[in-house]
Amino acid sequence: MAGEKNLALLLKNMQPRLNLGSYVFCIVPADFDLNGTTIIAAFREKEGVTVVLEVGLADKLNLVYETPMAWITLEVHSALDAVGLTAAVSHVLAKENISCNVIAAYHHDHIFVGKEDAQKALNALLKLTSAIK
């Protein structure tokens, strides 16, 4: 089934869900052995590989990170070429003075916010989705 492209439908049906746990973004060398490590996401950059993983796992691997984050999944199946979802979500969070990092995966978009902003961010996203007619 193809992902949704209509912005109004994406916002109306996004069903933001707060995942349990604390997550961090870390950078590891390209040859770092992640074999068997449960990571949430990875992205290769020229400086190394950015990995997103649970804070406890980062501590176990002695990885350096800046701030623990909360992970919110938008449950709507968004198309990879949908226009406006990331902008709408980041705009609503910016109005609440909440920084966010967005990862668009094949089926869903994932929003990472400071752990202390988790409930405030979830409430802002729920308010956004309920405002769409």
Image (cartoon, helix red, strand yellow):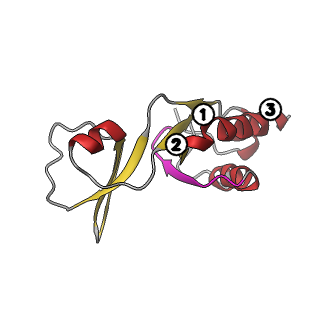
Read off the magenta span.
97-107
104 in the magenta segment: yes
Residues packed near mark 1 inside 10 Å, few (<14), some (14 to 19) or many (20 plus): some
Residue at image coords 22%, 40%? 60
- Write the residue at 49% across / 44% down: 69
Q: Is residue 51 above or below residue 49?
A: above
Quarter of image, res 119: top right
Q: Is residue 120 magenta?
A: no
Of the 4 image quadrants, the one containing the C terminus is: top right
Task: Tell me residue 2's x, y (percent).
Answer: 54, 37
Amino acid at circle 1: Val
Q: Vertical placement of 108 versus 91: above or below?
A: above
For label 3, the residue is 130
Residue at position x 51%, y 40% in the image: 70
**Which residue is denoted by mark 2 in the rendering?**
110
- Disc 2 + disc 3, Cβ < 8 Å: no
Q: Tags 2 and 1 in contact by the CB under 8 Å rule?
A: no
Work out whether residue 9 can be spotted.
Answer: no
What is the three-letter code of the residue carrying label 3?
Ser
Kindly state the secondary structure of the residue where label 2 is placed: strand
Position of residue 30 measured from the top left corner of the image (x, y, whole percent) = 19, 61
Q: Quadrant of residue 84?
A: bottom right
User: Residue 4 placed where, x, y %?
Assistant: 62, 40
Q: Is residue 36 left or right of residue 27?
A: left
Amino acid type at mark 2: His
Pick whichever, 65 or 113, lies toward us.
65
The foreground one among 53 and 3 is: 53
For label 1, the residue is 76
Residue in the image at 65% along x and 52% along y: 98
